Amino acid sequence: MFYRIPEINYFRASTLEEALELISKLENVKVLAGGSDLLIDLKIRRYEVKNVVDISGIKELSYIEDRGDHVAIGAATKLQDIVESPIIATKAPVLAEAVNEMASWQVRNVATIGGNLCNASPAADTAPPLLVLNARLRLVSLEGEREVPITEFFLGPRKTVLRKGELLKEIVVPYERGAGASFIKLGRRNAFTLSVVAVATLVKVRNGIFDDVRVALNSVAPKPVRAVSVEKFLKSREVSMSAIEEGAKRVLQDISPISDVRASADYRKEMSVILTKESLLRSLERAGVKL
Amino acid sequence: MALTEDPYTLISKWLHAKEFLVVGKGIARADALDKALGTAKFVEDYFQEGMLFVKQVLSTEPHAKILRVRDEEALKVPKVVKVFTARDIPGENQVGYALPDQPLIAEGKVRYHGELVALVAAEDIDAALRAAELVKVDYDPLPYVLDPLEALERKDVLVHEEVGSNIAFRTKVRKGNVEEGFSEADVIVENEYRTHHQDHVYLETEGALAIPGLDGRLTVVTAAQYPHLAQSIIARVLGVPASSIKVVVPFMGGGFGGKDDEGPLTAAKAALVAHLTGRPAFILYTREESLRMHPKREATIIKYKSGATKDGKLTAIDVKIIHDTGAYANRGPFILWRATVHASGPYEVPHARVEGYCVYTNKVYQGSFRGFGNPSVQFAAEMQMNELARKLGMDPVEFRLKNMLRPGSRTITNQLLEESVGIAEAVEKLAEKVNWAKRRAECESFKGRYRRGIGIGVAWHGISTSRGVPDWSNAYVKIDKDGSVSMFTGIVEMGQGSPNSSHRQIVAEILGAPLEKVKVVFGTSDAPDAGATHASRGTSIGAIGVLVAAARVRERLNKLAAELLGCKPEDVEIKNGVVRAKGTGKELSWDELIKQAYARGVDLSATGYFFLPKGKFNDELGQGQAYPAFSYVAMIAEVEVDTWTGKVRVLRIWPALAAGRIINPQQVEGQIEGAAVQGMGYVLMEQFVFDNKGRILNADLTDYVVPTTLDIPEIEKPVYVEDLFKYGPFGAKGVGEMALIPAPAAIAGAVSHALGKPITKLPLTPEAVYFELRKGGST
Ligand SMILES: Cc1cc2nc3c(=O)[nH]c(=O)nc-3n(C[C@H](O)[C@H](O)[C@H](O)COP(=O)(O)OP(=O)(O)OC[C@H]3O[C@@H](n4cnc5c(N)ncnc54)[C@H](O)[C@@H]3O)c2cc1C
């Protein structure tokens, strides 16, 4: 029942360097990008925060660049910029598909992709597409930079591998040639709603055989997950409806949903299977594969 | 024709008018531009720095004795002025509308998680928020009861000890002999229905600003649906005469009944602080507070048994209605009354037994909400009709039409409906427009993942207060020297538009004054008491007084013009500011006529009090006149169900209204669309989740989901049957609530048709539909 933002010291960084210095020096510090998660969390006292460093004004963190074999997205890039980017539309359309269904136009114009990932909500909608795209995250601190695959980034609800003094700087999305990918979100209404379950899938097919299969879901585990059992089952198998149906069922081995105000665990389980199947079918269609 | 000031004569004279200048036309409302530009002002817009900010401390227990409210820490916060509890109330701490069971601020014990325990006043919002967190309440927890069926049984856990049980109120209707009725039936359907709470989610949460001494009184600017009621509640709480309180309701960001209940209480909270400190005080609920504490649509359990003969005639209904009223009765008894007398749906039933129970539990309390007890019972009644039709092998529309109320029918309270019963015609026209039989067959051809269904809901809704409960109307009209007209009414402007569209049209129509010269001053307790803006009455009962006041002035103008133009008063024609003697070519301007009236001593001001005549109702027998008239509505909905996920999409909605005269079709369409969407949200997605302490777990708009634009279906132009009501202004009966009432029945009926299964429980979330489909094997 607290709806007051506690007293905090507010710092606005204008360069990455400045931001890194501030977050390494300050105690109980949180980075603020769009604030669309953080401000609510401050109000409900999810965190004990003394200092906030605002990175939303740092221009060098906001970009979408085509770098020949991958796309690079600055962590403070607004979600709406991703929706409207021609680069994303051609090189990573499944990401645009997911982001387009997030929040509303107004929120997408303040919220950032880095914020969605670093907030590490189990329901983060940019996670499933980035998980199937095998994205890599470039983390930076005063000590230097490191790169982690997104599959290793999330540790649990609101927990990531980010260390004290470290920021997410960039999301690296490798090109996927000859793949079909899709994202399906099931919410409680048609727009402006958090996922009950969302699934992203990516497939590559050669000679009627699954060459590569990647499946990721949110809202069905403490963190967004890859459905490795589904992937393992389908990989190298002949593409068929029965294989897809059988494969989709394996998703239950990869998830551990809970019941909450949005849905029951049982419903989430059933929907994970159904949406995995549906998304695989859609991905195949997009890859030009006929069943 | 002689000059008359008799309201009955005036109402009837204008009821039968043949031609209209502005009535019946889609005239833009007076506030359209201000709303579009964002210059229209709401309560919050009147807040200024330097006023006290009031914050509420809410109960964290479902049922507990209040041992102590400790404010020492809170008072140490700089800029905090004072913490107020029940003890500080100078007048009566009693605000129950139907029963005297409810304090403004909890006294002795709390009865739900979210009840008001203390008010904190501070110089600014931050200090108030901080201090509110530091107020500590010592509770002695009591056993509590959350389930209404359990509450009915228990005598050891009582929400209100003084009552002796958890039954706040009972109602009944009896007609004929049900046992006999069922013995005549060839088919019988028996089901238990469950419907859930709903929140109003008005864009503007509750707020009030109280300013001592303004205008010589304590003036309270507030978002309440009845300024005069807010005035009397404030007066009672402060222990002062009502005449020392003025209530002004500026533009309101939605009410839907919620601010009929909570509005006066909000006003009283700000007034209390202002009165005790002598300083302007402002309160504004957060969305979370609003969701946690203000009354909700009733949650119900309805046991319904009905019978019909082979040839499709209803023989009997036996209905038991249980309303979970939560911690307080509030308007629960009235809501239950409405549900009880409407339990049959708009049908002739020779034998009826209806019993209602309004049951206390330790949850947020129930209250007024668009439809007022009727959507839930019409849902049950209509689902019964669908099942009976199915068992009889009859088309659901045909079966309904065989039993529908018509002029000369008697209701289940044995009320004779002499006139103004246009529902059968409306349903026939609607079914034809929709091409019902064909569309229904087409729906059934969808067999794959996506199934289609079509459903109909037909409903009735009594006009005015139930039984003999007094109801009246009034207004004040005056014309200034420059020919401009002012009309003062207590009816409020909460988005529905009655003052700014239909009232203005009625005044312009009757006086013949140009529309742009007519100004409506609404929502003030300084205007004559016109009753509340609820029960779809703003443009109907609420405007009778407007009509009478304007018509009185018009009679005087006719007499004067006749003298000036040398004709008979009945030959005077006033249209858009030109005054003519019919057939003579003689004319004068409106402004000139008004000038002459001032020069010759004609009184250009009048009130229009009208006391609605009512029949008798015998509560013991459950028989008599329930309402002076009924408005009727029908809705057909077509849905698509995704059988993979259980997700329901409403594709199209077709409404029909038999609500008397349509004074402004544009506004009526707005009401129908809004109500249909609010009804759809109720059926498909809105629901509260309570924990085992009766705490609402989703008291925020992240998890209390209402429809967005992308969820809204195509809503077709309404079918109108203008079945005039003899006391309505120009025969209008009221529209505001109407389209919500059949929405649950129509949409759930369509889902049931798509699934090939009866539906007995709302809401129809994807999850609920998904598991319903798989229950006992799908079709
Ligand atoms: C109305 C509404 C609707 C929403 N709908 C959706 C939805 O449909 N789907 C969905 O997934 N989310 C939704 N959200 C949640 C939120 O908008 C997104 O998660 C958004 O992307 C968060 O970004 P932000 O820039 O606002 O993050 P912030 O609130 O600024 O930050 C979030 C967290 O990440 C940290 N952080 C931010 N940037 C960095 C960085 N570069 N390095 C390290 N840490 C960082 C912050 O310290 C904080 O802990 C919604 C939120 C609202 C208010």
Image (spheres, coloured by chain):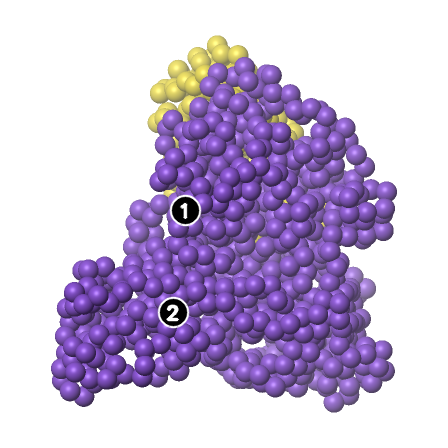
Q: Where's the N terminus of chain A, which quadrant?
A: top right
Q: Nearer the viewer, residue B268 or B347?
A: B268
The residue at 63%/81% (across/down) is: B416
- What is chain B's hue in the picture? purple
**Residue B16 placement (x, y as % from top left):** 39, 82
Q: Badge 2: how crowded within 10 Å, few (<14), some, or many (20+)?
A: many
Q: Which residue is mark 1?
A: B248
The residue at 50%/67% (across/down) is: B611
User: What is the chain identity of the residue bearing mark 2?
Assistant: B
Q: Badge 1: how crowded within 10 Å, few (<14), some, or many (20+)?
A: many
Tell me the tag on residue B547. Answer: 2
Tell me the tag on residue B524. Answer: none
Task: Identify the image quadrant of residue A285.
Answer: bottom right
- Identify the element where label 2 is drawn: helix
Where A85 sits versus A58, above or below? below
Q: Is mark 2 within 8 Å of ligand 1?
A: no
Q: Nearer the viewer, residue A113 or A86?
A: A113
**Residue A56 placement (x, y as % from top left):** 40, 27
